């Protein structure tokens, strides 16, 4: 909340289990670890904080960013935490001890993206003033520099800033959204080849805020500042236009069943 706290609630009766307070700034993000035993929060300062669900106490602060931390999340296996900041970096931390193990530089301005694939083998990053998104792949073994991820490829093609992105459920594809009014689909398996670009989802008349795959990986939904959402085939054909909002559409997603 903007009141500087995070509250944990029971879904069945709405009772508050813990109030995670002691943060001096507004909290803009909070996420559970995969096992539900920890929560990571991002107050509007230069840190992220890791809390224990058993006692509701902050067990460590992740210190190292030079500007406001905008988001924090656990990797799907729970071993890493990714934070992104206005300082233009994405940092990866060991969840166990809070040690920073890698810093990804996204050029000037805010680090816009730090998105794990579903099982954590891939990471998608991009910066505020960057028209290129980058895919990183997890190192099978710990390299000499200790970095858990290594650069795989850059996704080059958008004319304006990349705003969002998502991996397909099977990790075979990635979709990126952009201020250039389009989304683009890419092959991940062809990361090292020139044929990784699949196609452009063109039709929106304003910035695309979100693009995400369906659970079956056969469709993509986009949400735009043009006040519509659109459903697309993987052949980049617009199947449906969802109109009716009176202002820009900031998010869209599929139900678990698609």
Image: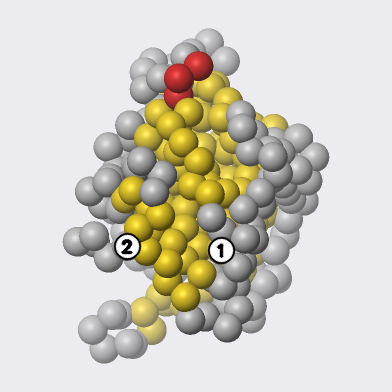
In the picture, the quarter occupied by the C terminus is bottom left
Can you give x and y, in whole percent of width and height, for residue 173 in the image?
37, 35
Residue positioned 61% across, 32% down in the render = 157
Tell me: residue 171, above or below residue 194.
below
In the picture, the quarter occupied by the N terminus is bottom right
Residue 224, which numbered label? 1
- Foreground pick, 191 / 224: 224
- Front disc: 1 or 2: 1
Tell me: residue 79, above or below residue 26.
above
Instruction: Give the secondary structure at mark 2.
Output: loop
| Residue 238 visible in the picture | yes
| Residue 50 visible in the picture | no
Tell me: residue 251, above or below residue 150.
below
Can you give x and y, in whole percent of width and height, for residue 51 in the image?
47, 60
Q: Are the residues tagged 1 and 2 within 8 Å (C-beta)?
A: no
Instruction: Give the secondary structure at mark 1.
Output: strand
Does label 1 or label 2 sit earlier along the sequence?
A: 1
Residue positioned 57% across, 15% down in the render = 145
């Amino acid at each position: 909340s903007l009141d500087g706290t995070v509250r944990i609630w029971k879904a069945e009766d709405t009772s508050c289990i813990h109030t995670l307070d002691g943060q001096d700034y507004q909290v803009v993000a909070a996420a559970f670890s995969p096992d539900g035993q920890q929560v990571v929060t991002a107050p509007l300062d230069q840190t992220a904080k890791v809390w224990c669900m058993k006692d509701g106490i902050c067990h460590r602060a992740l210190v190292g960013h030079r500007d406001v931390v905008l988001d924090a999340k656990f990797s799907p296996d729970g071993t890493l935490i990714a934070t992104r900041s206005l300082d233009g970096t994405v940092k990866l931390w060991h969840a166990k001890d809070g040690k920073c193990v890698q810093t990804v530089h996204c050029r000037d301005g805010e680090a816009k993206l730090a998105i794990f694939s579903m099982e954590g083998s891939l990471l998608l990053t991009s910066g505020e003033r960057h028209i290129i998104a980058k895919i990183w792949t997890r190192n099978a073994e710990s390299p000499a520099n200790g970095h858990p991820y290594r650069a795989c490829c850059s996704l080059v093609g958008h004319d304006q800033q990349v705003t969002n992105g998502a991996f397909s459920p099977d990790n075979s594809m990635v979709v990126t959204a952009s201020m250039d009014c389009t989304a683009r689909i890419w092959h991940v398996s062809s990361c090292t080849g020139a044929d990784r670009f699949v196609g452009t989802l063109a039709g929106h008349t304003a910035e695309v805020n979100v693009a995400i795959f369906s659970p079956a990986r056969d469709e993509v939904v986009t949400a735009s500042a043009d006040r519509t959402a659109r459903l697309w085939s993987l052949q980049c054909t617009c199947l449906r236009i969802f109109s009716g909002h009176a202002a820009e559409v900031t998010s869209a997603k599929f139900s678990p069943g698609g």
